[in-house]
Image: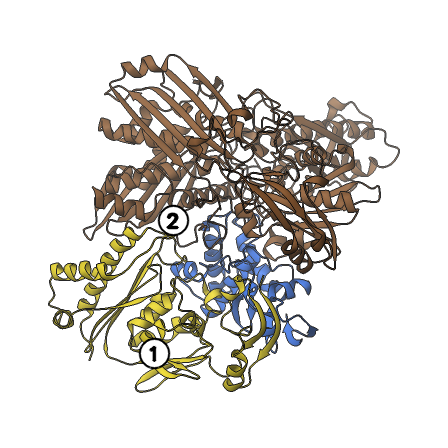
Chain colours: A blue, B yellow, C brown
Amino acid sequence: MKISLMLNGTKIEREIAPDLLLIDFVREEGCYSVKRGCETSGCGLCTVFLDEKPVLSCSVLAARADGHAVTTLEGLQKEAEEFGAFIADQGAEQCGFCNPGMIMNAIALFRENPDPTEEEMKEYLAGNLCRCSGYEGQLRGMKAFLEYKKQGGAV
Amino acid sequence: MLKIKNYVKAESLEQAYELNQKRSNRILGGMLWMKMSNAQIQTAIDLSGLGLNEIEETDESFRIGCMVTLRQLELHEGLNTWFDHMMQNSVKDIVGVQFRNLATVGGSIFGRFGFSDVLTAFLALDTEVELFHAGILPLREFVTMPRDNDILVRLIVKKTPGAYAYLCHRNVRTDFPVLAAGFACTKEGVRITVGARPKKAMLLTVSEDMAAKIREGVCSEEEIARIAASLAKEVPMESNLRAGKEYRSHLAEVLICRGLGILQERGPKE
Amino acid sequence: MKTVGQPIRKKDAMALVTGQPVFTDDIAPKNCLIVKVLRSPHANAMVRSVKKDLAEKVEGIEAVYTWEDVPDERFTLAGQTYPEASPYDRLILDRHVRYVGDPVAIVAGRDEACVDQALKRLKVEYEILPAILDLHEAKDSEILVHPEENWKALCKVGADNKRNLCASGESHDGDVEAVLQDCEEVVEGTYHVKANQQAMMETFRTVCYLDPYGRLNVMSSTQIVFHVRRILSNALGISKSRIRVFKPRIGGGFGAKQTSVSEIYPAFVTWKTGKPSKMIFTREESQIASSPRHEMEVSVRVGADRDGRIRAIDVYTLSNTGAYGEHGPTTVGLSGHKSIPLYGSLEAHRFRYDVVYTNVMSSGAYRGYGATQGIYAVETAVNELAERLHIDPVELRLKNMVREGQIMPAYYGEQTNSCALDRCLKRAADMIGWKEKYPCRDMGNGKVRSVGVAMAMQGSGISNVDVGSATIKLEEDGVYALSIGAADMGTGCDTTMAQVAAECLDCSIEQIIVSGADTDTSPYDSGSYASSTAYITGKAVEKACRKLQEKICEKAASMLGCEVDAVEFDGHTAVDRTTGKQVTLKEIGTAGQSGNARSLQVTETNSSPVSPPPFMAGMAEIEVDKATGHVELLDYVAVVDCGTPLNPNLCRCQVEGGLAQGIGMALYEDVRYSARGQMLNNSFMQYKIPTRLDVGTLRVEFESSYEETGPFGAKSIGEVVINTPAPALTHAVANATGLWIHELPITSEKIAMGLLKK
C-alpha cells in the first residue's frame, strides 16, 4: 500500500507492507536514533512524535502514519544538542542506547509543560527505561536545563 | 510476529462492521496488545478516521469515543472534576505517556482484559457501552458477554453525583496491577469493582443500609472493616506471576477498607 | 591534578545524546543475511532428527544448520583468560539440548520474514529426558546434565561432570568450628538469591563479514573482543589469526556481554557461506537464553562475643550454573572471598562451595559477580547478629570492619593498603541521620519508616591474571592517539583513559584521541570486566604516557642539539635549559615524520599482583505499608571509596546506576521457571526493572583513600556499587516489620503475608 507523510519535515511517499511497524519504517528511512529495546511496548526507546504527540513507534503501523507528521530525533537535532548537553554534563548518557527515546520524550514534556516539577518529570518519563544511570543523573540534567531555560538560555 | 495482509481505514462504521464479520479480519485499537500477538490478520480495520477520538460532555453524560486514548482520559478536566480524578488515577501508572497516547478506550474495554485498570474504573461508574450492532447496554452486562464481531463505538458515562475513588497495588510502578479497585458512592448505593484478580473486574455491591451509612459518613472503622472482610471473601482470586491468590484476597480487603474510608471522607455530592 | 578528578564530558556524549548511528545494528552492512536460531522447548532432551527440507525450500533461505553440521570440539562461551576456569562444555549446536531455549538449528536467510517462516517449517523430533530444575537436586543426581565424554575442565576447580559439579572447593583460615563453639552468640541463616537479568537496553547482537583477505570480521556488542576471538577460534576450529573482532558503541553490558552469547551463530554462518550476516537477539531471547546472575543459596554462620567482637564467619555457597558452566567456578569464589574479608577481626573463617549444573539457562557474569550474593548473605547475618546482641549495627561494624593496613586472610592474604571504609560508614550514617532514625518510626497510619545498612567491597581486576595495555603515539599536529583494548560499554572508559593520558602528558583532553577494542589494532587487553579497566588498563596508560614523554624529550633533544637531561618539557614546549632554545610539541610531531628513526609511539602493558578492593557503605530509608506490604524507597545514601575518582561525574553515575540495579534485585527482579523449565519472565512486561518512579532519591558521596598501585590512586568502581541494596533493604524491612526475609526479591506479598502470619 502507499502512504504519504511528513518525516522530519520532508514530505515522502512510500510503498509499504500493511504490517510494517513505524519503527522499522523510520529506520529504513535512515532514522537510526530510533531503537528497539523490547517487544512488549514497555521501554520507551522507540519514542517518536506522531504529529505532536510522543508515541511508541514499535506499536504503530506505518500505515497509520499516512497523512500525518512523524518526527524522530534526526529532525530535532538542535533541541537534542541543546538539551542533551545537560545530560552529557552529568555523564548521565552512559551507554546512550536509551537516550534518543528519553530525549524525545523530555522534549515532549518541555513543550507540554515548560516548568515541570520533579514529580511531573518522573511521571512523564516513567515509560523511558534506563539501566545504566539510575535516573538520578538524568534528573539533574533536566533540572539544570530547565534552570538554564529560565535564565533565558544563558549559562 | 503479527502479520497483516490488508489495511483499510474505514470510511464508515457500516463498512467497518461489514469487514469485521469475517473471522480473519480485525478492528485495530491502540494495537499495543495485538502487536505482541502472532495473529495472522487478513484485513486490519482502522477506525481512526471516523471522529471517534473525542470526549463529548453533555448535561447528562460523557460520551467517550472508542478511539479516545488513555492519555485523553487522564487529562480530561470534566472527567477528573466529576469523578474525583478516578480516571486519571486508574491510567496514570499504565506504562508511560507514549503508551497512553496510543492505547484506546475501545481497545481496553472491548478486550475485557483481566489486568485492565480502565475496565475496573469504568465498571464502578454508571457506564453504558454503545455497540454498532447490538446498541446501548450497561457495561456490567457487556463485561460478561462473549467476544463477538460487533464494534464498540463509544462509552457513555452518566454524570451521577457522588464520591469516587480508585486504588490499586502494583509491585513496580508502571507494571500491571496486582489488584485494582474502583469505588463509587452515589444515591443509588455503593459500588465496588475489583480487577486484576487476575481475572477481569467484577462488581460488588454494599448492602443498602451500610451504603446509606457510608453516604452519610457515619460508618465506624469496625463496620467498614467488616464490610471489607465480607466483600473480599466474595471475590474469586487466582495466582499468577505477580502474586498468589491469598495475598490478593488480603489486598482486596485492605483496598476495599481504604476505598470505603475515602468515600466516607469525601461525603455525598448532590 | 588538571584532568584526572575532573567531571569531564564523555568524548562520545554528544553523539549519543543526539542519536547518531553508532551502535552495531545502525552500522551493519545492508545486505546481511538474517540469522536466527530454533530453540528447544524442552529442558532436557536429545534431538532425534531435524527435518529441514521444507525450511530450506522457503524462498530467500541461504542455509539451515543442525548439530550434524558443526564441529564436535567443546569450548566455553565465558570471556576469561586462557586457560579458562569455566569448563569446555559447549558446542555451537548440540544434539543434547539442556534447557528451554537451547539452540537446535541455525537458519540464515535474506530477511526476517523468510527466516521466521523457515523456523516454523523445521520439524524436530525430540527424545525428552527428565530434567533437573532445582539446584538442591543436582549434585550426584542420576540425571546428568553433561554426560558426554568430551566434556573437559581446563583448570583444577573441583569440577566433575559425572556428579553435575561445575566446581567445588574449600578454603579456610584457623579452626572455624572451634572458634564458633567458643562464641557466646552464633547467628545462622541460609540466604537465597535468585538469578537476575542484566537487562541492558541493547540486546545481544553481532555482525559478521569477510574482509578482502578472507578473514572473518566480527563486529559485536561485546566487553571482551580478544576473548571472543579465541572463543570463535575454538568454536569454528580455525586459527585466531583468521578472525578480527571489534566493537562499536555498546548499549550496556553489566557483565552480560562478558559471555559470547550471540557471536558464534552469525560467525558460523558467515564462515560457511562467505556472506555477511547478523544476529539481533530479541528481548525475549535476551531474557531466556543469555547469561544472568548465578542463583545462589548462601549459608552463613557468624560467631561473636556478647560485647560484639565478631570472631568467626563460616560460609557455604551452593551456586546454580544452569545448563553450561560459564563463569560458574569463578563467580562462586567471590561469594566468600569478597564478603568475609569485610570483617577484619576474625580469628577464623571457612568458605566452602559447590557449583552445580541444572537444566535452566546458563548463568554468566553480572556486575558484582558472586560478591553480590555473598555480601547479601553475610551482611544480613551481621545485621541479625546486631539485633541479637542489642548493639547498633553501625557500631558493630565500626568495631569489626576491615581497616587500612590489615591482612585479609579470606582475600588471598592481601593487605588493604587503601581503605576508607570507616569514613564511608560514618559519613553515610551522618547523611541519612542514622542515630535519629534507627531502627524505625511509626508514622501512625499503618506505615512505618525504617533504615537499614550494609557494607560492600569488590576487587580491582583479577590479580596476576588481568592484562591491560595502551598504545600511545604522537601525531603530526601534536595530538596523541591512544589505543586501548578495554571496552567502553557506556562506562566512559575511553574518556577516563584519555584523562589519565592527558594528566600524564600535561595536555588537554581534546589533545587525546581514543580508539578502542579491535583485536587487529588494539594492544592486548583481557577486556572490560572484573572491575579492571580503571585500575589495570589505567595504569598501562600511565606507564605508556610516561615512556612516550621520555621519547618526546629525546626527540626534542636531538632537534635542539642538546642532552636529554637539559630538556624541560611542559606538555606543549620543550626547552633546552642551557640555551633557552625551544621546540613545540607540534614541531616534534611533525619532525617525527621526516627523516626520523625514533619511534614516537609506545605500547605498555600492565598486570597487578594485587586487586585492591574498593569499599562502600549503603544505607536505605524506606516506608513500609504494613497492610499491603508495599515498600516505598525514600532515600538511599551511598558513600564509596574507589580511591581517586578519575571522573567524579562518571563515578557518580556508576554508583547511581548500580544502586538502581541493586534495588530492582532486592525488591522485584525475579527469574522464575515453570514446572517444565520455561523461563517465565521472558519480557520487560514480566521482568520488571526499576522505573524512575521506583528508585527514590539516591545520594552519593565519595570518601577516597589513595591506592598507590593504581593510576593516580584509583581503584575500581563499576561493580561494588550493586552490592549494598539487597542487604540494606532486607535490614530496613526487618527494622520496620520484624521480618527477616531470607529470599530475594523482598516482595510486598512476602512482607504482608509474613506480617499476617506473625
x, y percent for residue C443: 21, 50
Furthest-right residue in view?
Answer: C595
Q: Quadrant of the N terminus of chain C?
A: top right
Q: Quadrant of the C terminus of chain C?
A: top left
Element marked by disc 1: helix
Which chain does the residue under circle 2 lie in?
C
Examine the rendering and report whether any part of residue C290 can be seen. yes
x, y percent for residue C185: 25, 21
* Residue, disc 2: C697
Q: Mark 2 Cα within 10 Å, few/some/many (few <14, many 20+)? A: some
Which chain does the residue under circle 1 lie in?
B
* Foreground pick, C520 / C680: C680
Q: Is residue C457 above or below residue A20?
A: above
Q: CA distance from mark 2 to mark 1?
A: 34 Å
Q: Amino acid at mark 2?
A: Thr
Q: Amino acid at mark 1?
A: Gly
- Point 54% across, 22% down: residue: C157
Q: Is residue C731 above or below residue C748?
A: above
Element marked by disc 2: strand
Q: Is residue C262 above or below residue C185?
A: below
* Residue, disc 1: B78
x, y percent for residue B109: 40, 72
